[in-house]
Amino acid sequence: MGEPVALRSSDAAVRTSQHVRPHERDVIGSSIAVRDAVKRYGNFSAVDQISLDIEPGEFITLLGPSGSGKTTLLNLLAGFQQLDHGQILVDGKPVQDVPTHKRGFGMVFQSYALFPNMTVSQNVAFPLRMAGVGRSTTDRRVAETLEIMRLSEHAMKSPSQMSGGQQQRVAIARAIVMRPKVVLMDEPLSALDRRLRESIQIEIRDLHQTIGSTILFVTHDQGEALTMSDRIAVMDAGKIVQIGRPLEIYRRPTNRFVASFVGESNLLDVEVLQKRGTTITVKSRAGYVFNAESRDTIEQSKATVLVRPERIVVSNEATANSAPVTVTSAIFLGEILRIQAQMAGGDELLIRCTDTVSRPLPEIGDRLHVGWGAEDCWVLS
Amino acid sequence: MSAVSLDAGAKRSVRRMATERLKNPALLLIPAVAFLSFIYLLPLIDLIRISFSGPTWLGYFQRVFAVPLYWESLVRTMQISVTVSFLCLLFGYPTALLIHRSRGIVRILVTTAIVLPYFIAILIRTYAWMVLLGRNGPLNKMLVSLGILSEPAQLLFNRGTVLLGMTAVLLPLMVLSIYSSVARLDQGLTRAALASGAGPIAVFWRVVLPLTLPGIGAGVLLVFVAAIGFFITPTLLGGPGDQMFAMHITQQADSVTSEGFLQALGVVLLVITLAVVAVAGRFMGLEFIWGGRKLDDTPKMAGPATSVGRSRRGIGSIVADLIGWPLLRLSGHLPAGFGKWTVRLMGGAVVAVLILPIIVVMIISFSSASYLTFPPPGFSLRWYEQFFSDSNWMRAFWTSLMVATVSACLAVALGTSAALGVVRSNIRGKSAIMLLLVSPIIVPPVVLGLSLYSLFLRLDLVGSVFGLAAAHAIGGLPIVVVILSAALQGVDPKLEQAASVHGASSLTVFRLVTLPAIAPGLAAATFFAFLHSFDELVLTLFLSSAELKTLPLMLWGDINYRLNPVLAVVSTLEVLLVVGGLILARPVLATSKKTA
């Protein structure tokens, strides 16, 4: 029983190692620098003085709700729209006057945008033909790329005969067939169901390892952004509100918006009692006193602190440093329990804890005791 | 006891089955199909029968192809039709792109400039060209004042004006057909092509053009088929050397001795038209006639249709490679923005050509001069006074109004019922029935008029209001069916189910749910059916009498012997009627555009 599985996984390992051949990895992505980019529609600034530096070969995600300007920023990079002000530099050279088709980027669209009048292989060959690459080279590169995307057997199909996931893999193949130094991806997975989305997320990450291009990925799905990116730029109202590595964005958000948009969060308004460098002691509305971490020393006497739901420790008895809460709802989600509870003073708490056999599912009205460590409590600036 | 109750139960179930049968939506097709069979199919069959009734059964046809007059005219008709189709495509495509690319007020203006002429009578638009190009017309005046001509020249009555007039008349058909294809284009595809390194011209050649081929095909076919049967425009704008085939039929119709031969002429025109449509239908599906998508009862067609599509794609891409690449290489040297400016200039020219003649005629209707001249020496309402005080014009106006009202009612009643039948029933051969319902659009009006003439003679209907209205309803019916089946397809069946679940009977469902949903479509269909009859000339030429003169008939008579500004008044009133109707129908046009 175990043998075929083992065989298959070793097979996969061999295949992956084949694909990361050194000569294919020598495509190294471009650096991109956005300087004071502004794009207005009437009085509305879709992109409002954004500056952003992207390292060569980096996988960077623009994350934000709809209307935050992330797609506009991507369109500005692609050249579909023109900057009102500012500069975009690729490898140090300004590109804002270069038309889209001469920028040499690859791009994947949310709607796939496969040419319905061409077969899969004709779609993938399109960028090569536009670049005037010879027929034999074209055929070889198309075959290679289809192989990487595991589409070889679909080469002669028409896009309309394929499933959504397959179509999106064709669109990715078309975007990377030229081995572009920059690949732009505009919410490429949002039309797919969850399972497929997760498998293609991994595929795209592996692909990024293989081809080494700079990838600029746009999404409104924070889970997707956390999974895939080297760095995430969180956008809101035309501005980048925070940029950093996924872990940093999640653990150390700079403001309320990032804290609540990325992951689930409990935000408590507190009074600052005592400051010792970056560790400060605060008091909640109910009078519960605890320690929290902050990025810098803070001046003000009021603050908002973030406690992630999974960092809250729940017990049935009061301990040192714990606060009593009343359960208002408890939902069993499989591997975890999702509990909502109210603290004295009115603060609502969301708690996620792993399901254990020893603990029965709390009922509405039950009293529990919650607590958290100073390192799990982050002061927003 | 039990046997009796069983019997009663059986009876009840029989009765229930009978009422179920009566509720079958397919029954709604019967009135329209019966109407068309009697007044449209039978006369055409009769026409064909008479054409074979010569001394030998091919006798009349031999004469058609033996007499150089007819043979040459047939060749000429083909030449003119091909040229007009080509010209319409050449100028229509950039115009469709212009509509698609423009935004806001520009888009509204350009669209209006295309749609408005589409609904104005061919007779009036042709008359406008006669005014524009006439000896005292604005073009001659301009050329003389610029010193290009020393005195006004005869610009009318030659092949050039025939081509110009026909192209102008048929351009809106082409533009709207292509636009429906262009509008369906996913903008993402253009962006994807650009992002893949294709320049604007490569994007056009590789992506936009191949994907809009269906619209091009439909447009070219519709224009070509209409041009083959054209009669009004070549008669008014052409010289002796520009006789088109349909004109021979009307001329022969006046002489009694040509019975049989006349019908043979009609059959030749009909067969050519149907052959062209059939060949085209083989390639792109007959849906192009009504500008619709495939009806959902043809799953069997899907298999072979896709294989045909694939082999055609193969040929298409070979052609694209052979011709396209060298052209693309050349176009690389063209300045940037070349395509954009081509679209703007050609589209702008088309808008001017479509709108200027109408504006000139509207201005002339207020002229104070006693003859046609532009610019008018002064302005007055004298021609309006003359129109409204002339009893002949007024009688013609009331006749037209009556005929068009009766005709519209007939077409809407039959057409609505038929549209319900087409959309709601699940019978086999729905496509064939739809084809029958819309086929009057493609039959040359001259042939239809000729075939109806003998039926009307036999039934003593010539010169009767109801007869003429029924004849006009043949052409009004397809308009109603097309508009209403589109409207009905837009009604969510869930709404009707929701109403009946909550206790509404099927009639109540129709009254409270379906009817309000299709009301805008119904209003538009009524207006267009009315307009079709109001503007109809060719059938009327065959079927009316001295006592029954419609407005277009009066216009036709006057254009042929004196061009006075009263005609401009009639034209202006017609334009106002169309503008009013379009404003009324705007919601419908807007939604149909959205779904397209």
Image (spheres, coloured by chain):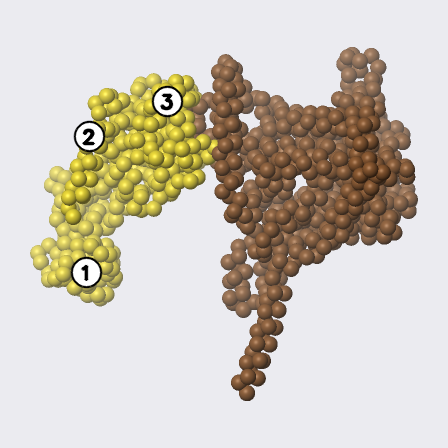
Chain colours: A yellow, B brown
Residue at position x 52%, y 59% in the image: B495
Mark pair 2, 1: CA separation: 53 Å
Location of residue B194 (image quadrant): top left
**Residue at numbered disc 2:** A17
- Tell me, yes or no, whether the two marked residues, 2 and 1, touch with CB atoms within 8 Å: no
Q: Chain of mark 2?
A: A
Q: Earlier in the sequence, mark 2 or mark 3?
A: 2
Q: Are marks 1 and 3 on the same chain?
A: yes
Q: Is residue B574 above or below residue A346?
A: above
Kindly give the residue lying farthest to the left in the view shown. Answer: A320
Residue at position x 18%, y 43% in the image: A4
Mark pair 1, 3: CA separation: 66 Å
Front in this rendered view, residue B75 or A191: B75
Q: Residue B151, percent across and down?
A: 84, 15
Left or right position of B331 against B241: left
Mark pair 2, 3: CA separation: 24 Å
**Residue at numbered disc 1:** A325
Badge 3: residue crowd in 10 Å (few <14, some 14–19, many ≥20): many
Q: Chain of mark 1?
A: A
The type of residue carrying mark 2 is Ser
Q: Earlier in the sequence, mark 2 or mark 1?
A: 2
Residue at position x 15%, y 44% in the image: A3
The type of residue carrying mark 3 is Thr
Residue at position x 24%, y 33% in the image: A206
Mark carried by residue A380: none
Location of residue A142 (image quadrant): top left
Q: Residue A355, percent across and down?
A: 17, 57
Q: Residue B472, percent across and down?
A: 77, 47
Badge 1: residue crowd in 10 Å (few <14, some 14–19, many ≥20): many
Front in this rendered view, residue A271 or B216: B216
The type of residue carrying mark 1 is Val
SS label for mark 2: helix
